[in-house]
Amino acid sequence: MAAPTATEVKAIKPTTLTDAQIDARVVSAGVLTGDLNAKCGTSFTTGELEEIQLWIAAHLVAITTPDAKRENMLQNDLDVTHHRGKLGIGILSTEYGQTANMLAHGCLADFMNQKPQILFVGSATITA
């Protein structure tokens, strides 16, 4: 599977990050898509997985760019800067993550929202 390039990510999400910084996010996106078929019980093609990885990488750029928490707007002739508060909704917190989730038929949001489980041998399962 060919990983998306920094140029491809920047075509979707313009950013001031360096190509090396974007490449790091592409690697992280690859971790998420690496076993997506097993996690989702699907059979995405290589091309589909590459596209999902591209949009996850754009999502990771969006949430980690220094200006990601601020949004400027003109309001009543005043330049207003406010923080975009979309914490706690994971992959759905950006339009890029929403697109990745749509391409994955909703699976990304489903498995990312699962609560972790701790399993003890000889004991009951404890859900955090």
Image (cartoon, helix red, strand yellow):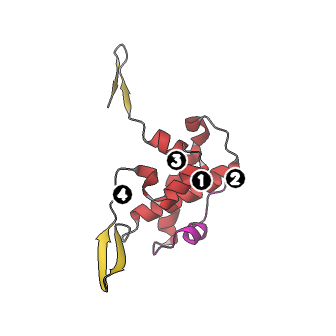
Q: Does 75 sit left or right of 36 as displayed?
A: left
Q: Could you tell me how far apart the alpha carbons at marks 4 and 2 are, in whole angstroms?
A: 30 Å
Q: Considering depth in this image, is 81 or 26 the residue closer to the camera? A: 81
Tell me the element at label 3: helix
Q: Which is nearer the N-term, disc 2 or disc 1?
A: 2
Residue at left offset 59%, top offset 47%: 104
The earlier-in-sequence mark between 3 and 4 is 3
Q: In which quarter of the image is residue 36?
A: top right
Q: In the rendered image, which residue does mark 1 sit on?
A: 52
Q: Is residue 31 visible?
A: yes
Q: Give the range drawn in magenta.
A: 1-17
The residue nearer to you, when weighing 22 against 13, is 13
* Picture coordinates of residue 23, whole percent (x, y): 53, 63
Type of the residue with mark 3: Leu
Q: Which of marks 3 and 2 is nearer the N terminus?
A: 3
Q: In this view, does 57 lie above or below 115?
A: below
Q: Establish if 56 lies above or below 43.
A: below
Residue 78 position in % (x across, y down) = 29, 84
User: Marks 1 and 3: which is nearer the front?
Assistant: 1
Residue tagged 4: 86
Determine the residue positioned at 52% across, 53% down. Answer: 29
Mark-to-mark CA distance, 1 and 3: 10 Å
- Please say whether residue 37 is one of the residues in the magenta stretch: no
Q: Name the residue under label 2.
A: 47
Amino acid, disc 2? Gly
Which of 46/112 is in front?
112
Distance CA(mark 3)–CA(mark 4): 21 Å
